[in-house]
Image (spheres, rainbow, N blue to C red):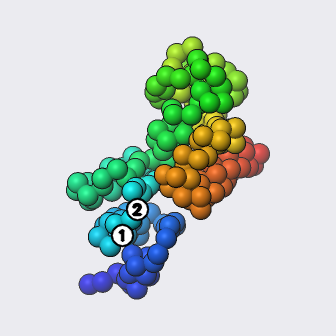
Amino acid sequence: MLPIDNDIREQITVQDGNIAISASAGTGKTHTTVDKIKAEIAINHTFRTFAAITFTKKAAKEIETRLSGSKGDGFVGTNDNFVLKEIINPFMYDVYGREFKKEIKPNYSSENMFRNFEIGINKIKDTGFICKYNDNRKNFSFQLALKILEGSEAARRYMQAKISEYLLTNIKIAIKICITCSLTYVRN
């Protein structure tokens, strides 16, 4: 039996360009995303990469598994992994100096939590670890990635070349929305 929204799923699969799928849990977002990626890989031989950015490790792993080797150079991962791999690690030094030209790894243990942005920057400088705020309604990685995109021409050019200017705008908007949502949540 076909899903009730099968026509919408098919439209997503054949639609040109970037897409964002928003739906409730368990509605088939991951399945539809994989179908879209596979369709693009089959018909579009001009692109070099894609990005399937999710909120959960579970969804990222499911996409990887369902693509079963057809991923190529595409990125599949969480939004935090994306900003760390594609923005923070390669370009932090461009904004904050050569002492940040090193591999930065996540360490979200409770002893590495902090309360303000400058302490987070110093943690990276001193330990090489990106950590998180002790207030889990704020996202340090997103704030840092946005500052890097705003301050680094090289980061902006890289992202434009890798993903496209349209998607870069959406990433910056998404990061700003996530920061705003976190701040709004704190106020309520």
Write the residue at 64% across / 51% down.
Answer: 172
Write the residue at 67% across / 21% down.
Answer: 119
Quadrant (top left/top right/bottom left/bottom right) for the N terminus: bottom left
Crowding at label 2, few (<14), some or many (≥20) Cα neighbours within 10 Å? few
Residue 138 seen in this snapshot: no
Write the residue at 40% across / 55% down.
Answer: 49
Along the viewing direction, whichever of 169 and 177 lies nearer the viewer:
169
- To which quarter of the image does residue 33 belong? bottom left
Give the distance between the C-alpha atoms of the residues marked 2 and 1, in whole angstroms: 7 Å
Along the viewing direction, whichever of 9 and 16 lies nearer the viewer:
16
Along the horizontal axis of the image, is 56 left or right of 167? left
Amino acid type at circle 2 is: Phe
Along the viewing direction, whichever of 10 and 116 lies nearer the viewer:
10
Q: Is residue 68 above or below residue 57?
A: below
Residue 169 seen in this snapshot: yes
- To which quarter of the image does residue 96 belong? top right
Amino acid type at circle 1 is: Asn
Crowding at label 1, few (<14), some or many (≥20) Cα neighbours within 10 Å? few
Q: Are marks 2 and 1 in contact (CB under 8 Å)?
A: yes
Label 1: which secondary element: loop
Which residue carries the number 2 mark?
47
Furthest-front residue in view?
A: 46
Write the residue at 58% across / 17% down.
Answer: 99
Which residue carries the number 1 mark?
44
